[in-house]
Image: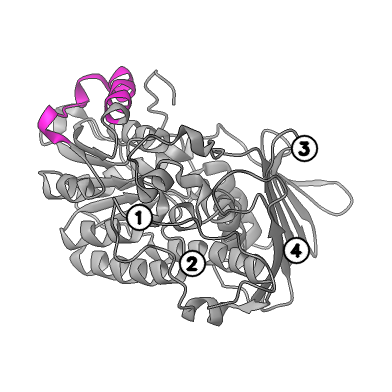
């Protein structure tokens, strides 16, 4: 987040049509925004939402922590000033606080809590006729994906907007690149190799730091990145950005199947997620996509994409801009212009549509990319070769039912290939 306003609406490719800038002198009615989840990503999303429209204002916030709400509002106010209009009575606490935000007088809700809660919150929002910005991923298991599918249909029937947090889809330099790839500049795609090598996002703290009286559910939610039911594992929560670019390159056509491996190399006290994955997707034409993901400290880091085609190759992330070359190293295409901010542009599109009374619904592809990541994770957990049809019909549901914020929830064991069964 930058604490200086950015209204840089640049010319981009036809795959991302620039919304009109809303002029203050022509608009008098506010678009009221509600924020659910006041962590780092929620704080950033709220600030970007307020920048997207001259008359957007933050009206309500939900979180499980008063301190987090106040810290978030302070950061947003430093950037967006008087657009922050959250009265004390509109700061809602608790696991059901999302309902109170959505039920308040808002027009659009930003869903930015841990993704395990996303399907339930999305359903409530669309049933209450709200426009939605939803962070990625949209679910952490196949049962959640099926719920999101239904919610997307409800929003479409009600003519409400849904825009996703797959920010690379809104980055002009990647959008123009993918347009070139789809036009055949490198011929047919033979392989796509993506890396997401990084350190741990939120390491699990020692059990001795757990406050007295805090329930299992509260403790696991506080440390949400370490539990499958809350985050979906790093491959689904973080590397899903790479997964989404793979899906995009293959025109969102699903793969035939996936095999994968992974595990926990660095032990930690508590939690049940892996710290490394390698997933191999087979596509209908015989092409392969490989995605490698690590969250281990003190080792080689890289976030890059390498696409090999019959007539050329693409490299993303090994320099400031993507590069397209033939197999002899001749440059076939290079991005010209200034990169936009994908995190900002996704909100620009959403709020421009709301302001003009139009409907933008990114539901189908956000569902597909989320399920594609779940497929890779499940193949690694089980050691099985899993087809697209199998993961679509999987009965796996990780969310605790019935949900009790004060309830007991023993740590589930870390999955073991060959022992953990496909459901």
Extent of the magenta region? 69-91
Separation of disc 3 and disc 1 at Cα?
A: 33 Å
> Which labelled disc corresponds to residue 117?
1
Q: Earlier in the sequence, mark 1 or mark 2?
A: 1
Which residue is located at x 62 percent, y 73 percent? 255
Q: Earlier in the sequence, mark 4 or mark 3?
A: 4
Q: Is residue 326 above or below residue 190?
A: above
Q: Nearer the viewer, mark 2 or mark 4?
A: 2
Q: Earlier in the sequence, mark 2 or mark 3?
A: 3
Tag 1, which secondary structure?
helix
**Residue under label 3:** 300
Rendered image quadrant of residue 90: top left
Tag 4, which secondary structure?
strand
Q: Is residue 54 at least partly visible in the picture?
A: yes
Residue 329 point in image, percent of width and height: 86, 47
Separation of disc 2 and disc 4 at Cα?
A: 19 Å
> Which labelled disc corresponds to residue 215?
none
**Residue under label 4:** 191
Q: For label 2, count other residues whose C-alpha is less than 10 Å away and answer few (under 14), some (14-19) or many (20+).
A: many
């Amino acid at each position: 987040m930058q604490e200086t306003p950015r209204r840089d609406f640049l010319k981009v490719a036809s795959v991302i049509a620039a919304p009109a800038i809303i002029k203050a002198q022509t608009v008098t009615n506010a678009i009221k925004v509600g924020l659910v989840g006041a962590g780092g990503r929620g704080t950033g999303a709220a600030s970007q939402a307020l920048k997207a429209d001259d008359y957007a204002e933050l009206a309500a916030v939900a979180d499980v922590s008063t301190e987090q709400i106040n810290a978030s509002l302070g950061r947003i106010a430093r950037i967006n000033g008087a657009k922050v209009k959250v009265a004390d009575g509109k700061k809602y606490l608790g696991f059901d606080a999302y309902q109170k935000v959505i039920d308040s007088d808002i027009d659009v809700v930003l869903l930015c809590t841990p993704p395990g809660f996303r399907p339930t919150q999305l359903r409530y929002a669309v049933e209450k006729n709200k426009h939605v910005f939803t962070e990625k991923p949209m679910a952490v298991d196949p049962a959640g994906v099926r719920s999101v599918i239904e919610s997307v249909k409800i929003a479409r029937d009600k003519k409400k907007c849904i825009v996703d947090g797959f920010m690379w889809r809104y980055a002009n330099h990647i959008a123009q690149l993918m347009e070139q790839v789809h036009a055949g500049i490198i011929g047919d795609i033979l392989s796509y190799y993506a890396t997401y090598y990084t350190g741990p996002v939120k390491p699990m703290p020692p059990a001795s730091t757990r406050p007295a009286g805090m329930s299992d559910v509260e403790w696991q939610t506080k440390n949400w990145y370490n539990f499958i039911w809350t985050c979906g594992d790093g491959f689904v929560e973080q590397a899903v950005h790479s997964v989404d670019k793979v899906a995009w390159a293959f025109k969102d056509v699903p793969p035939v199947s996936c095999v994968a491996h992974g595990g926990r190399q660095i032990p930690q006290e508590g939690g049940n997620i892996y710290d490394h994955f390698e997933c191999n997707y087979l596509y209908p034409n015989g092409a392969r996509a490989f995605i490698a993901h690590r969250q281990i400290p003190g080792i080689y880091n890289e976030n890059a994409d390498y696409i090999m085609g019959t007539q050329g190759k693409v490299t993303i992330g090994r320099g400031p801009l993507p590069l397209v070359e033939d197999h002899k190293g001749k440059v076939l295409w290079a991005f010209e212009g200034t990169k936009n901010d994908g995190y900002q542009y996704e909100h620009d599109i959403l709020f421009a549509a709301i302001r003009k009374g139009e409907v933008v619904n990114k539901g189908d592809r956000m569902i597909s990319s989320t399920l594609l990541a779940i497929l890779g994770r499940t193949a690694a957990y089980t050691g099985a070769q899993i087809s697209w049809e199998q993961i679509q019909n999987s009965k796996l549901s990780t969310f605790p039912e019935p949900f009790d914020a004060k309830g007991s929830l023993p740590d589930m064991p870390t999955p073991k290939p060959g022992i953990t069964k496909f459901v």
